Amino acid sequence: MNRRDLLKSAGIASLALTTASLWSVADAQDGSRIFTLANPTGFPDLDPSTSFSNDGLVMANVYETLTRYIPGNDSAAAKVAPLLAESWETSADGLTWTFRLRQGVKFHDGADLTGEAVKASIERTMKIGGGAAFIWAPVIGVEAKDTHTVVFSLSSAEPLDLIASSGFAAWIISPAAMDKDNAWFNAGNDAGTGPFRIDRYEPGQRVVANRFADHWADAPEGGFDTAVFEVVEDSVLAQSMIESASADWTYSLPFDNLEALDANPDLNVVVNPSFENLIGLLNTRRAPLDRLPVRQALALAFPYDDVITAGTAGLGSRSRGVIPQGIWGHDAEAPLVMTDLEAARALLAAEGLADGGLELTLTYVTSDALEALTAELWKANLETLGVTLTLQPMSWEAMWELAKADPNAAQDILLLYWWPTYVTPHDCLLNLFRSEDRPNFNLGYYSNPEFDKTLDEAAALSGTDRVRAEAMFKAAQRMMLADAPAVFILDKPNVHITRADVKGYVDNPAYGHVVFVNELSR
């Protein structure tokens, strides 16, 4: 960073710290406790039916689901815990699920949680069909059997307790908001049962949420009264905020800085395995990446070990496909592509692309240090092969829109983090690689009917015969890997920074970069 950039960053930091200090003054005046989250991205959609991005951080504090996934030491030790549902059971054939709701739960508008509210919430999400609504695909009917009982009928035996724990599209919404449109929610209105309710929304800047006094769960002693979700795209600024106590939690700081952060007695560096991986999606729709040998050459030219060492301080691990470690269906025996520049050169030569002439564009998120380093290291390797890789940093929202608009005009390579919508191998394979008429997250535009068929059959078995389903998910992934529609870079460690005086923080990798503020205290 040059002197001008340093001065610019310092000026931005000064402004942000001044803003944060105003919150501190308010805190001192009325005795309330404020938890400030410095988040590296914005919150593009606050509609609980369609939210399917980094807005999950806000959603998880304002809305609630029927169940919640609790990880264990391995996938076999994980469990699904009650949340708005106190208990549930399934029929022997796995096609009928009955959930009994917690009593005494209030929505933020004062309405009671009922079976009808749950039914209407799921049906609203299914009808709109946006975001992660696909999680309810096996549901063919929802019945409010009585005030506190909901019965789901399925077309195939999928694990509805897991689906209901999803970090997207499973939120339960007040009956009064069923006819509200997306614009209403994105004006800062909410209709949840969560421990916090939105007080103010400033798009691109922050969400301020205050404690909901009638929430059914008690807050811990010393719990927080206000959660401030600050959008802080500059990692220098985010680090300044966490070090100066202007923020209580952040992530996506450069891994090179972790040693110094960990040595700071005022901070806690929380590191654990995640369910998140970094992937380079290849535009299979457009020449020359529509040719398998060219895609294979790009994978062989990727500096896997260098990215893990330099980009994650050695904390990351090689991805074996798209299903990360810790999720059932992970294939520990899947083949690894190793860096081999000479083999890459030979493949390109065989395709008539030796020593120049191949120009590609790669996009990544501007604020992400790991993605930036990944792009630069890959570019350097490709230069030795005569391949020109143009790097284009963008905001996540702009990059996503570019990729969805027109595959023939989109980037050649898109760097993307993925974590599951709910904890199943189906989610990873479905979203990123199942054929789509209109691109959403399959942003390499991969299409293989045999893969689609195997994936669908595995999903249909997943609620009653997990062993057989797991074998089929692995077979589907091996089929996809042979087609090389992406470069599978690394399984990413979760690294979150908190202030040392924050108590109760435990990262749950099933909910990517989500903080359940109601569980914390100071």
Image: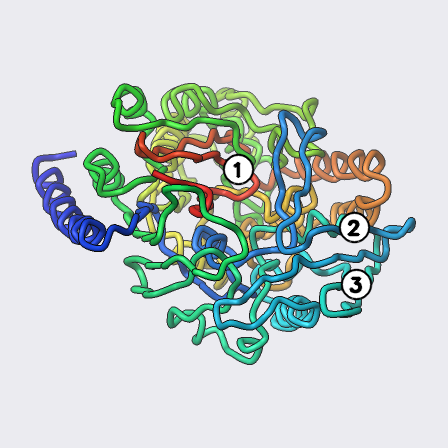
Measured as percent of width and height from the top left, residue 146 is found at 77, 69
**Of pointers 1 and 2, the one earlier in the residue sequence:** 2
Instruction: Using the rendered view, name the quadrant where residue 313 is placed.
Output: top left
Name which residue type carries label 3.
Val
Q: Which mark is residue 151?
A: 3
Measured as percent of width and height from the top left, residue 264 is found at 25, 23
Measured as percent of width and height from the top left, residue 303 is found at 44, 24
Local packing at callout 2 (Cα closer than 10 Å; few below 14, some 14-19, many 20+) is: many
Local packing at callout 3 (Cα closer than 10 Å; few below 14, some 14-19, many 20+) is: many
Please name whichever residue, 81 or 279, is drawn nearer the observer in this view of the structure: 81
Q: Residue at x 82, y 48 (%)?
A: 457
Secondary structure beneath label 2: loop
Rendered view: 225 above or below 500: below
Name which residue type carries label 2.
Glu
Tell me the quarter of the image containing the N terminus.
top left
Q: Residue at x 34, y 42 (%)?
A: 391
Q: Which residue is mark 2?
A: 158
**Of pointers 2 and 3, the one earlier in the residue sequence:** 3
Secondary structure beneath label 3: strand
Q: Which residue is mark 1?
A: 508
Residue 414 visible in rendering: no
**Of pointers 1 and 3, the one earlier in the residue sequence:** 3
Confirm or deny contact between disc 1 and disc 3 (CB under 8 A). no
Name which residue type carries label 1.
Asn
Local packing at callout 1 (Cα closer than 10 Å; few below 14, some 14-19, many 20+) is: many
